Amino acid sequence: KMPFDDGAFDAVVAVKALCSVAEPRAVLREVSRELAPGGRFGFVEHVAADEGTVLERTQLLLDPLQQVVAGNCHLHRDTDRLIARSVGDPAAAAADSAALFSRAEAAERYIVWPMWPIAQQASGVVVK
């Protein structure tokens, strides 16, 4: 919980941060709370590699050690999919507590091999 009023910001940005928090869903709830209606949440995160790839197997193998040596950084966290599941119809938000944002404006996954083992990256913008 951050010491800001509800709707205090027009934009919030996270860069390579959601991999290491204990409760990423709680962070998204807090971001949504702090955003004004129509406010944007931009993110650039490393994420879990695509299923069945060598990169995924490497992430899964190294993940426990990574968490210990890199401040709880999870190599294989589906952050972009968690954010995507947080987008929904705001009118249905009371019925579906997963709806924290009204729409996604942009989202993409891409590989940056020099950043191995965090080569799988995702970026995007969602709107409250």
Image (cartoon, rainbow, N blue to C red):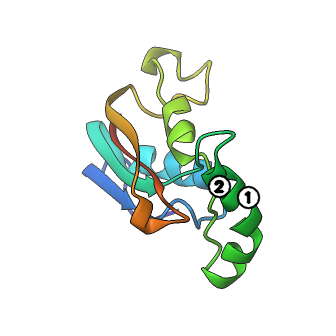
Compared with 51, 5 (above or below) is below
Task: Provide the residue designation for mark 2.
Answer: 76
Give the residue drawn at x 32%, y 56%. Answer: 13
Q: Is residue 49 visible?
A: yes
Task: Provide the residue designation for mark 1.
Answer: 60
Q: Are marks 2 and 1 in contact (CB under 8 Å)?
A: yes
Q: Is residue 127 visible?
A: no
Percent of width and height locating residue 41: 33, 46
Q: Earlier in the sequence, mark 2 or mark 1?
A: 1
Q: Which one is closest to the eye, mark 2 or mark 1? A: 1
As drawn, is 89 to the left or to the right of 43? right
Quadrant location of the C terminus?
top left
As drawn, is 41 to the left or to the right of 60? left
Q: Amino acid at mark 2?
A: His
Q: Tag 1, which secondary structure?
A: helix
Marks 2/1: CA–CA distance:
6 Å
Residue furthest to the bottom in view is 69
Q: Amino acid at mark 1?
A: Leu
Give the residue drawn at x 31%, y 54%. Answer: 12
Percent of width and height locating residue 127: 32, 34
Q: Toward the viewer: 6 or 41? A: 41
Q: Residues within 10 Å of mark 2 (few under 14, many from 20)?
A: many
Q: Tag 2, which secondary structure?
A: loop
